[in-house]
Each structure stands twice: as C-alpha cells, then as structure tokens.
Amino acid sequence: HRRQQSQPQQNAAAANSFTESVIGATGPNANPRLAQIMPSLVRHLHAFAREVNLTVAEWTAAVDFINECGKMSSDRRNETQLLCDIFGLESLVDEITSTLLATSTAETPSSILGPFYRHDAPLLANGSSIVQNMTPSVPWYDQAVADSAFLTGRVLASSGMPIKGATVDVWHAAPNGLYEQQDTEQPEMNFRGRFETDAEGGYALYALRPVAYPIPDDGPAGRLLGMLDRHPYRPGHIHFIVSAPGFRSLTTQLYDDRDEYVTNDAVFAVKEELVVKFVPRKDDPKARWSLNYDFVLGRV
Ligand code: MBD
Ligand code: FE
C-alpha cells in the first residue's frame, strides 16, 4: 500500500521545474557533446522514475546491480556490455551509428561487436583453418567434423570493385558454446584469425558452422533475464570485422539459419541480410559445408 504521492509528483509544474533545475546546473564550459545530450538524459531519467514511482529501495537495488556488473567485468568478461545487450542497447546504437555513417545502401549491414572480440588474432594465409584442436580427444570432436565449413567470399566497394589487401578478422564460439577465452580447455586464440584478401578481393578459410548458445547467464545479467522470464540464447553466429584503408571498417555477424533463435535472439542483433544458408560441400575432406558471402564496405 502506497501513501498519497508527494507534491512534486502530483504537480507537473513543480516536477518540471525540479528537472529543469538539474539540467540548468550544467555550466557554460561543459563538454559540448555532454551539454547537448545531458538535458535529454536527465529528462528521460526523471520521467522514468516518476512514471514508475521508483522507490529508494528499488533504486538502491539497481545501483547494487550495476556495481556488481562492474566488479565482475574484466578482459575476459564484460558484464556491463552484456547488460546493455539484453536491453537491445548495443544493437540500437550500432544501427544509429551505421545509419549516420552509411554512404550507400549497397553496404553490408553491421551487427554488434559483442563482448568476446580479441585484438591480435593470428594472421593466417588464405585457405587455412581457424580450428586449432580437431583431434578425437576433444569432447565435441564429432560435432566439429559434422559442422566443418569452408568460408569464402570477396570484399567489395559499394561500386562492386574488389578490394585487395582488406583484412577479414573472424571469430566464433566452439561447439560447446564457449569462446576460447571462456574455456580453459581450448588453446589460445582458437576459432580466431585474420585473413587478407587477394587481388580479386577474395578471402577463404576453414571454420565451423556455429551453434546456438546461451550468453553467460551465471552473473547479474543472467539473473535479470531470469527475473524477466527470458531465455539467454543467441542463434549460431560468426563474427567479422572487415577493414581496408580508405573504407569504414565493418563490424558484423553472419547468422546460421538452422536454428530457431535466428528469429529470437537474446540480444536483438539479427538482420535479415545477415542470415545465411550453409550448403553441403562434396569432395573436401576438411569441410562438410560451404558458405560464400561477399562483404561490401562504405568509403570513409
Ligand atoms: C555473444 O557471443 C555475442 O556475440 C553478443 C553480441 C552478446 C553476447 C554474447
Ligand atoms: Fe558472439
């Protein structure tokens, strides 16, 4: 049972003047971008708190929650980013940014970076494999064989011109659903590599068809999913950062159409043009599946 609401909440003019006084505290020498965006942030924050009648106990729980996310975050795990992801915020800002910067509708759509990118993945020759530990002693060896895949394609300008010397930085999770840095059983930089396109703009590599897997749900972000009666699954996906001098680098993901989460992603990152169909591959002992996908970059 709540008591009658206090004056500032009942009285719109008083509420408004309180919010505007907070906004008005910003000084003339404030950082210009902050001075531009803070009024909106403060108005939305205050309006939210008033709309839901946020209590001190609820606000304290939220502060504790965010602190817990921060304390848990490290090089190996970015819980605060994961929290943003389950709100759709990383996908939203990614879409805002690519819409702002795009110069042509021919460009490949972007998709979010996610928390598991690592710099300095090994530079590998075209045609080589990012799968490091394919031996029968690995628990998921059979699935890795069944999902072995040859990935090819070109990197193009929006004019259709092939881009030679573009870098294709690629990473995906193991068949057990874990990225290499989450899993002490995997070798360093497993399922990661950087490739350089040839004179025709072509790249080629061996990898695996990716599996659907739960985002890490043993921390605060996972607890929140539970309280919201939401599942933690992402569709099987392969991450890419495609870059070349003179072009805007493209952070994106390709989504395997084989599982149900392709229309029900826990982090709201799937775009139709990024959903792919692997095709059976014959006469290659190293791969049961093929995927050909061209990436189109915009100019800087
Ligand atoms: C992932 O693997 C991922 O790609 C994203 C975007 C969020 C959580 C886990
Ligand atoms: Fe991922």
Image (cartoon, rainbow, N blue to C red):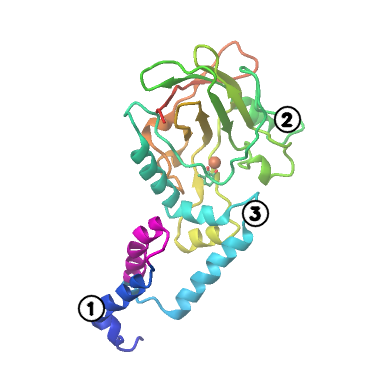
Which portion, as a residue range, is magenta?
28-48
69 vs 261: above or below: below
226 vs 40, left or right, is right
Residue closer to the observer: 91 or 32: 32
- The spot of residue 231 in percent (x, y) is 48, 52
Q: Residue at x 67, y 40 (%)?
A: 180
Question: Disc 3 residue type?
Answer: Ser
> Residue 243: within the magenta?
no
Residue 149 shows in the view: no
Residue 90, above or below 297: below
Ranked by sequence position, the earlier of labels 3 and 1 is: 1
Q: Are marks 3 and 1 in contact (CB under 8 Å)?
A: no
Marks 2/1: CA–CA distance: 64 Å
Give percent across and percent down for residue 215. Answer: 55, 49
Residue 150 shows which numbered tag? none
Within the image, what quadrant is residue 49 found in?
A: bottom left
Tell me the SS state at disc 2. loop
In the rendered image, the quadrant that contains the N terminus is bottom left
Q: Which residue is mark 1?
A: 12
Q: Mark 3: few, some, or many residues within 10 Å (few <14, many ≥20)?
A: few
Residue 118 position (above or below residue 79): above
Per the image, the residue denoted by label 3 is 74
To which quarter of the image does residue 248 belong? top left
Question: What type is the residue that disc 1 sits on?
Answer: Ala
Quadrant of the image occupied by residue 272 = top left
| Residue to which mark 2 is pinned | 133
Magenta segment, prevailing SS (helix, strand or loop): helix
Residue drawn at point x = 35 percent, y = 77 percent: 53
Q: Is residue 18 left or right of residue 137?
A: left
Tag 1, which secondary structure?
A: helix
